[in-house]
Image (cartoon, rainbow, N blue to C red):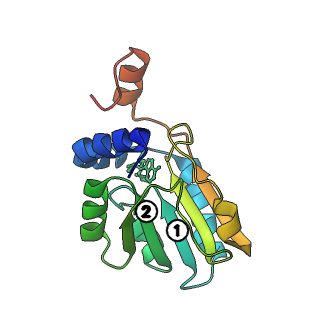
């Protein structure tokens, strides 16, 4: 990986992968849950789905892999190691999404939960989607009260 910004992201998630997983498991986000359920209901069995910035694979990649052919992609080696343990039914790759080159029209859906455009952006993910494909990106989240208070007080919510 050449881009120093992605190296920084990767080493950051390498260092906090397990802590992030434990923290994110407590995030409440009804909108995300509703959109996720719609996505699952819309796609046919064994649809081909890419989960961008998949993290440790729980719960989203695991839930997708219960019905679809899923490839999780993450720049952090530790996240992908955990994801392989957590979701044996999916395939994973350690990669920076930005220069990733996929076959045009090869995907039924692309998901990205809490993967921030500010740090990186897939240059042309739309071209990889089939005509009827679905793109589900999630950014916001409702933090558990203790974390929201910490964030308002200027402390990082994961501290
Ligand atoms: C906030 S976490 C979200 C993890 C998971 N999707 C979830 O909902 O719990 C963002 C993930 O995106 C990954 N990431 C950030 N920039 C990336 C890039 N350019 N290419 C691949 N993965 C990236 C990070 O390593 C991290 O695991």
Who comes first in sequence, dot 2 or dot 1?
A: 1
Nearest the viewer among 94 and 68 is: 94
Q: Residue furthest bottom?
A: 45
Nearest the viewer among 60 and 73 is: 73
Which numbered circle lies on residue 50?
Answer: 1
Residue 22: x and y, percent? 27, 47
Residue at 57%, 42% in the rendered image: 117
- Tell me if the residue at label 2 has its CB under 8 Å from ligand 1: yes
- Inter-mark Cα distance, 2 to 1: 7 Å
Nearest the viewer among 41 and 140 is: 140
Residue 108 lies left or right of residue 158; in this view the side is right
Residue 127 lies left or right of residue 57; in this view the side is right
Q: Quadrant of residue 139?
A: top right
Which numbered circle lies on residue 93?
Answer: none
Quarter of the figure with the C terminus: top left
Q: Quadrant of residue 60?
A: bottom left
Q: Which residue is mark 2?
A: 73
């Amino acid at each position: 990986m050449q881009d120093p910004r992605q190296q920084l992201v990767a080493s950051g998630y390498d260092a906090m992968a397990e802590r992030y997983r434990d923290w994110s498991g407590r995030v409440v986000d009804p909108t995300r849950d509703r959109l996720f359920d719609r996505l699952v209901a819309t796609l046919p069995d064994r649809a081909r789905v890419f989960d961008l910035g998949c993290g440790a694979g729980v719960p989203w990649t695991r839930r997708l892999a219960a019905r679809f052919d899923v490839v999780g992609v993450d720049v952090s080696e530790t996240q992908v190691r955990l994801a392989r343990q957590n979701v044996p039914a999916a395939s994973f790759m350690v990669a920076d999404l930005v220069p990733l080159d996929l076959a045009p029209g090869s995907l039924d859906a692309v998901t990205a939960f809490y993967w921030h455009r500010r740090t990186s952006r897939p240059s042309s993910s739309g071209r990889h989607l089939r005509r009827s494909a679905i793109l589900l990106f999630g950014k916001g989240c409702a933090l558990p009260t203790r974390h929201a208070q910490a964030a308002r007080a200027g402390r990082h919510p994961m501290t």
